[in-house]
Image (cartoon, helix red, strand yellow):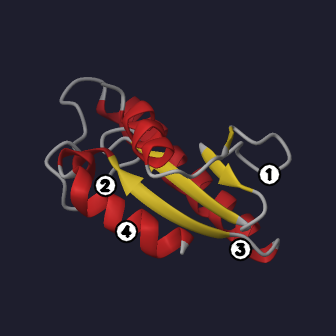
Amino acid sequence: MKPELAVRRLVHAMGYRYRLHYPKLPGKPDLVFPARRKIIDVRGCFWHQHRGCTDAHIPGSNVVYWRAKLEGNKQRDRRNRTKWRRQGWSALTVWECEISDPREVSKRIRRFLG
């Protein structure tokens, strides 16, 4: 199951309602809770290079391309997060590898959305 879809189902089952890919914010974040000014950003460990995760590796072929591509993703993530913060939004990042423990992710989300 795709990580974002798993988080969407979990959040919906918890009773929260959200907007998807909100076009009014930089980067069109995954799940947006406008009334709370909160964002849940679901990231794939490979594509966003989750530090310390076994899935966050650089492929052995075409290393120059992949290093630039994946570093660009990380830089864009940082820029978007800074813009959100400056606009008064709070963001929670949920990594793909964390979804294997839905109870823990649910706790984090509940604390975040309060």
Q: Amino acid at mark 1?
A: Leu
Q: Indicate the secondary structure of the residue bearing disc 4.
A: helix
Mark 3, other Cα within 10 Å: few <14 / some 14–19 / many ≥20: few
First in residue order: circle 4 vs circle 1: 1
Instruction: Estimate the spatial distance between the alpha carbons at disc 4 and disc 3, rounded to whole Å.
Output: 19 Å
Q: Please tell me how many numbered marks the rendered image carries.
A: 4
Q: Is residue 57 left or right of residue 42?
A: left
Residue sitting at 71 percent across and 74 percent down? 85
Which callout, 3 or 1, points at the residue further toward the start of the chain?
1
Write down the residue under mark 3: 85
Name the mark nearer the viewer: 4 or 3: 4
- The residue labelled by disc 2 is 50
Give the spatial CA distance, label 3 vs label 1: 11 Å
Left or right, 58 with respect to 94, comes to left
- Residues under numbered marks 3 and 1 in contact, where contact means CB atoms less than 8 Å apart: no
Q: Secondary structure beneath disc 1?
A: loop
Residue that appears at 18% across and 30% down: 60
Q: Earlier in the sequence, mark 4 or mark 2?
A: 2
* Sooner in the amino-acid sequence: mark 2 or mark 1: 1
Residue denoted by label 4: 108
What is the C-alpha distance between the residues marked 2 and 1?
23 Å
What's the amino acid at mark 3? Answer: Arg
- 20 in relation to 89, above or below: above
Q: CA distance from mark 2 to mark 3?
A: 21 Å
What crowding class fits label 1: few (fewer than 14 Cα within 10 Å), some (14-19), or many (20 or more)?
some
| Residue at mark 4 to residue at mark 2: CA–CA distance | 18 Å
Q: Quadrant of residue 6?
A: top left
Q: Name the residue carrying label 1.
A: 25
